Amino acid sequence: MIRYIRRAAAFCLLLLVALLVNAARVQLFEADELDDNPANRRSAIVRYDQPRGNILVGDRPVTGNKETGEQLSFERTYLHGPLYAPVTGYASQTYGTTLIENAEDAVLSGTDSLLAPLPFWNEFTRGRQPGGDVVTTVKASMQQAAYEGLRGRRGAVAALDPSTGAILALVSTPSYDPERLSGTGAAVTDAWSRLNASTSMPMLNRAIRQTYPPGSTFKIVTAAAALDSRAVTDPDAATDTPSPYVLPGTETTLPNEARGCENASLADAIRVSCNTVMAHLGVEVGLDGMVETAQKFGFNDTGLRIPSGVARSNFDTDMSEDQLALSSIGQFNTKATPLQMAMVASAVANGGELRRPYLVDRVTTNTGETVRQERSESYERPMNPATAVQLQRMMVEVVENGTGSNAAIDGVRVGGKTGTAQHGVDNSGLPYAWFISWAQAADSGRPAVAVAVVVEDAAADRADISGGGSAAPIARAVMEAALEERE
């Protein structure tokens, strides 16, 4: 009898060991897989059982939370949702997160180890802290000026502090209210379907996720390459450029919208925006030189994050000379985000040094203690300081005596460059209106802001949709707001 009891006890012990081994296997090796299983609602319940941390503009939250009284206890709310949607993104119980809500999700949801009282605390306890806050670099007055300037038209604005790279405004219109996507149920799925079906694509962040042909604003890049490579040694000297200009290896002529472009100097070509001179200079610099300069400005960078990912701006690395000529005036396959073109203006304004753009200033606990502070970093030096000084002078001439007069601000040094980019089959679409600029107060030793504006769908003829007509006034309003911030 004792023998059988021993066998039964041994068998029970074996079952207990197997149970413990299986429990350890589940907890140590399969926990993450089970947590991520869509059928497991426990993780969603835990995720939404406490308020989410806030995203701040200045010292004011532009997000919040409300109690639902349901299984998912807290739901995201947004203050001035359409205004800040290109900055915050959305945090949806149904569709996940985007933009800062996604990039800083660990902080906002309280799972980031930075928020824990001790190192590895969250990892050991599999717990979380109250959601932390994310303080952005955005200035409310500048964001408002850009949003109101676009007036709901398809377009975008990006504004940078040239000295630091801090993003001061990031606007995309038409926009949407991310709060409509926060919860669950039929209202949320209906809103999602309508937003995605809209031909105006309100959820597309045009400032960082849409690329456009930059048109004549790209001529600043070409001018930098021409000066640094010594293809041009005197920007005020005449160039040997016929008008119209025959694209190399073809019988296709490139015309000018402006007058007086035949043999025009680089300075005059920038001031009145001569296609022929800039296309010719791009060919003179050569493919390698143009690619090198464009990439120093940020083109072809697939890893730029602010902290959300930024679409790659393109400058082809393998082209024939006629394609290079068109690319050098911002056409052919050249494409850029508005943020990329703000980076171009920023590098000129900052004496040739480009600072890496960033959107988050600092991260804090829910009690306001800073646990991470972002630092200004150098991105690249796209041009020599002397070249930047020459380009600053040329861009000031654009505003004072050229195509960018609508951006002028009394008593302020303003530099700019207009752009009218062709697109569509046989250039049949309405051109995109571009304007890039920077502003520096008379009593300041550094520029206040660099701005890029694109207006995608202005209902006007070509003359009226020019960057100077449609986009420059928006840039001026943003620059004025930046200057007031500095006072």
Image (cartoon, rainbow, N blue to C red):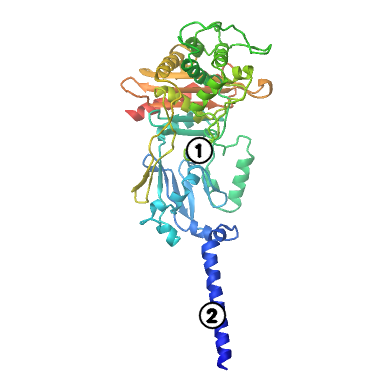
Dot 1 corresponds to which residue?
Answer: 86
Quadrant location of residue 334?
top right
User: Does any portion of residue 392 appear in the rendered image?
Assistant: yes
What amino acid type is highlighted by mark number 1?
Pro
Does residue 316 sit above or below 93 in this rendering? Answer: above
What amino acid type is highlighted by mark number 2?
Leu
Dot 2 corresponds to which residue?
Answer: 13
Residue 170 pos. (x, y %)? 47, 34
**Viewer-proximal residue, 191 or 13?**
13
- Is 23 positioned to the left or the right of 253 in the image? left
Residue extending farthest front: 3
**Viewer-proximal residue, 13 or 372?**
13
Residue 38 pos. (x, y %)? 59, 57
Q: What is the crowding at mark 1: few (fewer than 14 residues within 10 Å), some, or many (at least 20)?
A: many
**Element marked by disc 2:** helix
Residue extending farthest bottom: 1
Quarter of the picture containing the C terminus is top left
User: Does any portion of residue 69 appear in the rendered image?
Assistant: no
Residue 115 pos. (x, y %)? 39, 52
Quarter of the picture containing the N terminus is bottom right
- Is 460 positioned to the left or the right of 160 in the image? right
